Image (tube, grey):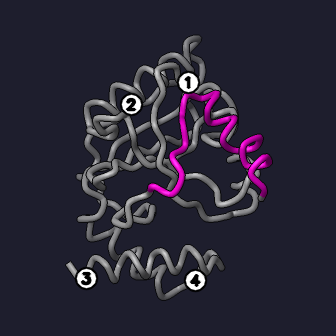
Amino acid sequence: MGRQERHRKVLGPLLRAGLEVIPDAVPASAIPHVLGYEQERILGGFLVAYEDPRLVERLNEGWYDLAMSTGLLDENREFLLMLPRGTWTAAEDRRRRMTHTWHRVRLLDRWDIMGAGANSFLGIHAGHPGFAMLALDNSVWLIADTYESGVGVYAVRDPALSPGVLRDLEWLAREDIYKDREFRREVTAWLERRQQR
């Protein structure tokens, strides 16, 4: 993908959502994202019903409160955001079953994660998000997804210390279920770095 295409398809929509991508700045310690964490690791979260007339506004408010209270954003308002490897939107990505990769982003002063963001790479359309975010120090995952009656957003503490997450990563290093060699290499490299500590 060329620079202009990447800007038009990825960076531009993220800027409209209030997220500036910081290239080549993902810490090597960033844990690959899997869903094997234990229920007791959930720090907090919220659910907003689709019928709420202020759906996007309430989702944005709840996301920001949760991000601030759990330490997702660092002092520069930076964190990691899971994005498709290519230029597919979340809807296309779900059909293709592609794996994702972390990108370092900075939250700008004006942002709309659950509206403009969910309408591009962070969901299906405005008010219907689907994303994963990670604090730069691996201390918290923030996950948003759509359910039958509404949108749920929740935070998971210390995913790199979760036995279930580690078990899932070890399994993915052995079994290439995604048929994605790059993701498998990332998982294997992360596990090897973890053992060397």
* Residue at numbered disc 1: 112
Instruction: Identify the amino acid type marked 4.
Output: Asp
* Residue at numbered disc 4: 176
Residue 105 image offset from top left, x and y in percent: 48, 42
Which region of the structure is painted magenta? Answer: 2-25
N-terminal of the two: label 2 or label 3? 2
Instruction: Identify the amino acid type marked 3.
Output: Gln
Q: Are marks 2 and 3 in contact (CB under 8 Å)?
A: no
Residue located 66% across and 27% down the image: 126
Local secondary structure at mark 3: helix
Q: Is residue 4 magenta?
A: yes
- In space, the residues marked 1 and 4 are separated at their CA atoms by 35 Å
Local secondary structure at mark 2: strand
N-terminal of the two: label 3 or label 4? 4
Q: Residues within 10 Å of mark 2 (few under 14, many from 20)?
A: some
| Depth check, front residue: 165 or 85 | 85
Q: Is residue 197 above or below residue 5?
A: below
* Residue at numbered disc 3: 195
- In space, the residues marked 3 and 4 are separated at their CA atoms by 21 Å
N-terminal of the two: label 1 or label 4? 1
* Residue at numbered disc 2: 46
Residue 119 image offset from top left, x and y in percent: 69, 32
Local secondary structure at mark 1: loop
Residue located 26% across and 51% down the image: 139
Q: Residues within 10 Å of mark 3 (few under 14, many from 20)?
A: few
Q: Quadrant of residue 161?
A: bottom left
